[in-house]
Structure formats: structure tokens, C-alpha cells
Amino acid sequence: MSASLPSALQTLANYRIHNTRASHEVVEKGKVLLNSNGTSRLGDDAWAFLEQLALAAIDVANYEIADECLRRLATKFPESPRVDVLSGIRMEATQPPEVALKFYNELLQTDSSNAAIYKRRISVLLRMGKIERAVTELSEYLDTFYSDVEGWVELAELYSSCNQYTSATQALSHALLLAPQNPFYVLQFAETAYTADDVPLAMKMFMLALDIMDRNVSEESIPTGVSVRAWYGVKLCCRALTERTCSSASDTPLPQNLDLLDELSTERVLTAYSVVGKDFDSSRELVLSWMGPSDRTGGRPRFIH
Amino acid sequence: MMVNYTVGQQAYLKTFFHAAKHPHLQVNGVLLGKKVSGTVEIIDAVPLLHHWTSLSPMMEIGLDLAGRHAESLELQLVGYYQACERLDDTALAPVGEKIASKVKEGFSDAVAFVIDGEKIGSPDNAALIPYLAQSPSSSWRPYTDAGAVTPFSPGSSFSLSSPDSPAHAVSLVRDQQLHRKFGDFDDHLEDVTIDWLGNKAAMPSDVHQ
């Protein structure tokens, strides 16, 4: 047990830093600590750990563990807004949504600055299927708590789920103002713009995402992760721009050198597949056939290095 | 005359694993199969997204690649499946209607399944709600057999080729965690070595179609 304790603590700490939702694992590792009174070894981290374990336990419906964590937290931090949020989440798990909403409303009357409680209320509304009301409340929340980037991203996703893609890009543009160097938000903007049928804007944003991601990377490297997705996006836009007339609601101009971009994106995606071994030849073949000819004459694609 | 649909074990397991791997997210994918003497045999499933499921670019690419993969297996795209974010939501999402209609353009008997979040996981319930449309441009509606027979129960036009598929799926997830080895197109875009088209590593050795 003592050999694996440091590594368990490390894993749990990592999950906290990255906000990972690996609830089964957290409960497996965490309950050992809880029962053996290992929390005393954590010092100040003990409270963050208990919060993490409570959330994970609720996620997998292990209410015994959740309640034990909550009890310890409430004892240590009476009348804490953060513990209030946790109590609310616990309530949401087993009580009807109206009960949780009432609890949150009462808390907000006492303290209207607890941003987390507004967001819990919006979560409950979403769970009840009241999308429109959730969108209204989230918009109002963001009027006050403007710098909540995740709030803007969530609003964009809600709009997208209701086919309101232009409103989604507007919400994302606020997120980008607040976090201009985050390639994920730029990528989400690009994909939303494409879905809204503004292909020139999508193209511009795919290229911007690549620019942000590739800043520290040499040109000859193999694209991985989010870059692959972005290059696929560029290729898709090139295809759309050459196959049909695309208008741009945002008046974004068409990119120059479209055929060069087409060749480049083809080459970048195919290079990403160069890491796959012989087992994946069919997967690479499939992508190759999807790529099609990448120059005007319909000849074989040329890969420029 | 009403066409019959059978869902093969491999298709069922993959749909189940996709939903099981992301229990708090919307997931979707397409179904592969062929029509044989008036019956649509759904043989395989190709998982698409679990992230930004309302956005279309990666969906379009994934759909295109899945279609080519189907051809290579001498099958066609015959349907679409999705699992909703909320347990009690059984509606076909707008994006689902779009994809299903696209599939229907190429296969007139296309079907869309929404996973029943409240029933999935019980060993004797297929937990798949079928949606059909009259034409690619008309709306999709939940299908009910004549005489109000529940889909996938005896006498329904929908059946599982192996009645124990749900029980098998539950035990594979619970006892072997096979769903953790399952990858979709979203996963593949982050790591191109992930076999989203075949998912052989996640299939038990005794799976039959």
C-alpha cells in the first residue's frame, strides 16, 4: 500500500490540475485514502482531494463516500460558498431538480456574487430540458461575469445544439477576446463557422489555429493532435471553395493561392499518416482516395517538402 | 410493405461501447449493412463523434471516409445512431436528422436509432428507438409497429440477430472494460493510429455478425 500511495496521490493531483473526469478511477484510488485516514498526509491538499472525491463519488452514484467527504468539508469549512456548491450538486443527484433550484435560489438571495451557484442553476435547467431558459440565464450571467471564458464556450455549444450557429460564433468571439492564444477555441470557431456555411471565415480560422499551434514547431515536423484536425479542416474548405460558390456572411475574403493551400493541406494530412505502420495501410489508402487529385489538371498529387 | 431490420451483434456491441465510453456526452455514428431479400441487415457500426457533435466539418469527413470503408467491405451506409446527453432525452437531434437524411439519399431504407438512456444496460432490452422517414427531405419519426408492438420484441419489424447481444454487451463493459479500447473519429483525429473504422481491439474474439 505504501509503495503505491505516492503514485496514487500524484495521479489524483494531476487529475485536479487538468480537471479530468476519471470518476471511477478517482473513487477507486480515493476511497482507500479516505478509509485509512491517509488524508492527514495530504496537508492542505486534503480539502481539494475531498472535494474531488466527493464529485467523483456522486458521478458514479457512490453516495456513502460523497456524504462522508461532504461531512468532513462542512465541519472544517462551515458556511463556505464552495461547500454550498458541493452540497447543491449532491442534492441534484438524488432530489428532484426543483428542490435543488430552490436551494440555489435561497443561496443567491443571501449572496448574489457566487458565480458557481448561477452556473449550477443553469446546469439543472439544462438537465430538465429547459434549453431556452438556460440560454437566457447564461446570457444574463455572462453580462455580469463577462470574463468567464468557459461560460462563453458553453453558450456557443448550446446555440450550436439548437442550430443557431451565427449566435454561436458571436459567443465564441467573446471567448477569443478573453483567450486569444487558445487554439481550441479558434478551432471551435472555425468548425462553427463552417457549419454556419461561412466557408471563407472557417478557412481563415483554421489557418489561425494552425498558426498558433505551429509557432514553436519546425515546418518539417509531423502534424499531430489538433493540427491534424485543423489541416483536415483547411482541406475541406479548399474543396468547398473550388466545388461551389461560397458566400461569406462575415464578408471574409477568399484566401489567395487556393490551389497551393489545397496541396499543402493534402500533404500535411498525409504526412500525419506516415507514422502509421503497415497495419494501417488500408486506413492511409482510404484517406488518400478521399484526398483526390490536388491540382487542377486532375493529375497525381505532388507533395512539396 | 414494411421492410424488416436486423441488428447484428458486432453493430450492437460497437454502438453500446461508444455510448458506454462517454456516458455523459452525446455520441453518434453510422451503421453499415446491406439489404437481403427485403431485410436490412445491419452488420457493423462506425463511430464518429463525442465532441462538438453539432458541428459539421469533421462529421462530413468522417461520413465520407466511413462510406468508402463500407464500399471496401461491399456494404453500404444504412443508418445512423446517437446517444443523447440526458438519460430521458430520446429525440433525434437536428444534426442526426441531417446525417440520417444524407444516408437515406444513398439507401432508401435508412434507419436512425436513438439509444434509450433509461433502458440501456438492462440485459434483456435492446434499448434502441428506431426513427424512419418517408423521404430524405421529410422529417424523421419514431417508428411503431402495427398493433403497437414494441420494437425489438417478438413480432416487431426490428430484431437483434443475437437476442443475447444486450446481456453480452453489459458483461463485456462491466467485466472486461472492452469499451475503454474503443475509439471513434474524434479519437482518431487526435491520434491517427487509432482504428476507428474497425475497432478490432475492442471486439471480443467470439463476436459474430
Image (tube, rainbow, N blue to C red):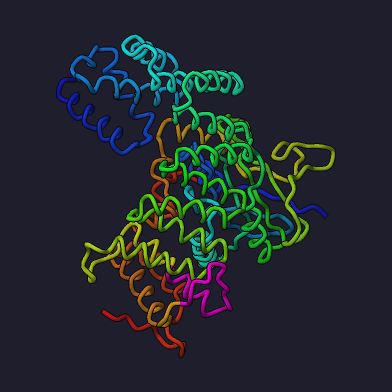
**Magenta highlight on residue A239:** yes
Q: Residue furthest top?
A: A75
Residue A115, image quadrant: top left
Please tell me which residue lies in front, B143 or A123: A123
Residue B204, image quadrant: top left
Q: Is residue B171 visible?
A: yes
Residue displayed at 62% across by 47% down = B7
Residue displayed at 64% across by 62% down = B102
Residue displayed at 37% across by 73% down = A265
Q: Is residue B127 visible?
A: no
Q: Residue furthest bottom?
A: A297
Q: Position of residue A58 (x, y in %)?
A: 44, 23
Stretch in magenta: A234-254
Q: Position of residue B28 (x, y in %)?
A: 54, 49
Please tell me which residue lies in front, A171 or A99: A171
Q: Relative to residue A129, is residue B197 depicted above or below?
A: below
Residue displayed at 67% across by 63% down = B107
Residue A150, image quadrant: top left
Please tell me which residue lies in front, A40 or B46: A40
Q: Relative to residue B177, is residue A300 depicted above or below?
A: below
Q: Position of residue A8 (x, y in %)?
A: 23, 28
Q: Position of residue A220 (x, y in %)?
A: 22, 71
Looking at the figure, which quarter contains the N terminus of chain B?
Answer: bottom right
Left or right of A36 in this view: A248: right
**Magenta highlight on residue A275:** no
